[in-house]
Image: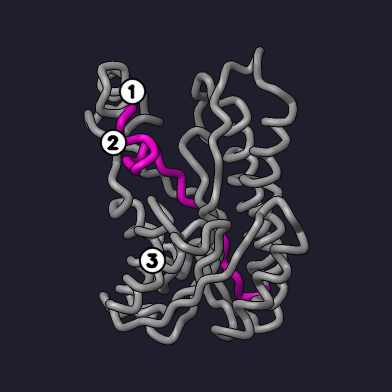
Amino acid sequence: MLKSFDLTGKTALVTGGGSGLGRAIALALAEAGADLALAARRIDKLEETARKIGDLGRKAVAVPLNLTDPTSIEEAVSEVGRAAGAIDILVNNSGISGAGWASDLPLERWDQVMATNLRGAFLMSQAVGREMILRSNGVIVNVASVAGVVGVKMLSVYSASKGGLITLTKTLALEWARHGVRVNALAPGYVLTDINREMFSSEAGERMIKEHIPMGRVGMPEEMAGAVVFLASDASSYMTGAALILDGGQSAM
């Protein structure tokens, strides 16, 4: 059974692989045997992750990417193709939050979040998916959020973008299943990263955890990364169009 999780010989492209959840996902895919391509704005962070992947005995390349720029997306995908070969696995991980009360949210912020979280993921899937369709093989994992399944106060645009990403996942799965391309989503709950560590350790953060997460704690990036390996591997070979929720029970409340 463990062989079905083996990604040896595969190349995975992870957006936002320089830190936090993206880095944990990239390292987990490398541990499962995949070589990696990492794409984001900050090349220095990507190179740190690439060195860690090298320590695991896998290859890694880092390419610049601006998800709000269609030309940058096309150039990044082409560069990965030249440097690492065909992309077998795409993980659309990059995203921004856009927190704020809906009544006060600036239109520019709405457009920025949508351009990154939803349009960017679509354009990446389109650019990589075309080649997967030609090869009749490939896997796409969209990192959505439990906020795309249930309402979360102060996250109107983030929730809308992630809910749209889940629906996009289902649509791409329907269109591309006949071409041998599987498309699934991961919907994490609150995950501890360097960005939110201070907030979760505050009195307000601890109260929020107690009130909203039945397991009484936030998730760790590594707990999400294992699910991505599952979705990217043959262990989920009969799974497409699904959203896998990992949220400590938050969506069950």
Mark 1 Cα shell of 10 Å, populated few (<14), some (14-19), many (≥20): some
As helix, strand or loop, the secondary structure at mark 3 comes to helix
Left or right of residue 202: residue 90 = right
Nearest-to-viewer mark from 1 and 3: 3
As helix, strand or loop, the secondary structure at mark 2 comes to loop
The x, y position of residue 234, in whole percent, is 42, 74
Q: Which circle marks residue 226 in the picture?
A: none
Tell me the distance, in whole angstroms, between the alpha carbons under discs 1 and 2. Answer: 10 Å
Q: Which residue corresponds to mark 2?
A: 218
Q: Which of marks 1 and 3 is nearer the N terminus?
A: 3
Q: Earlier in the sequence, mark 2 or mark 3?
A: 3
Nearest-to-viewer mark from 1 and 2: 2
Tell me the distance, in whole angstroms, between the alpha carbons under discs 2 and 3. Answer: 23 Å
Magenta residues span 179-199
Q: Hey, which quadrant is residue 163 in on the image?
A: top right
Q: Which residue corresponds to mark 1?
A: 212
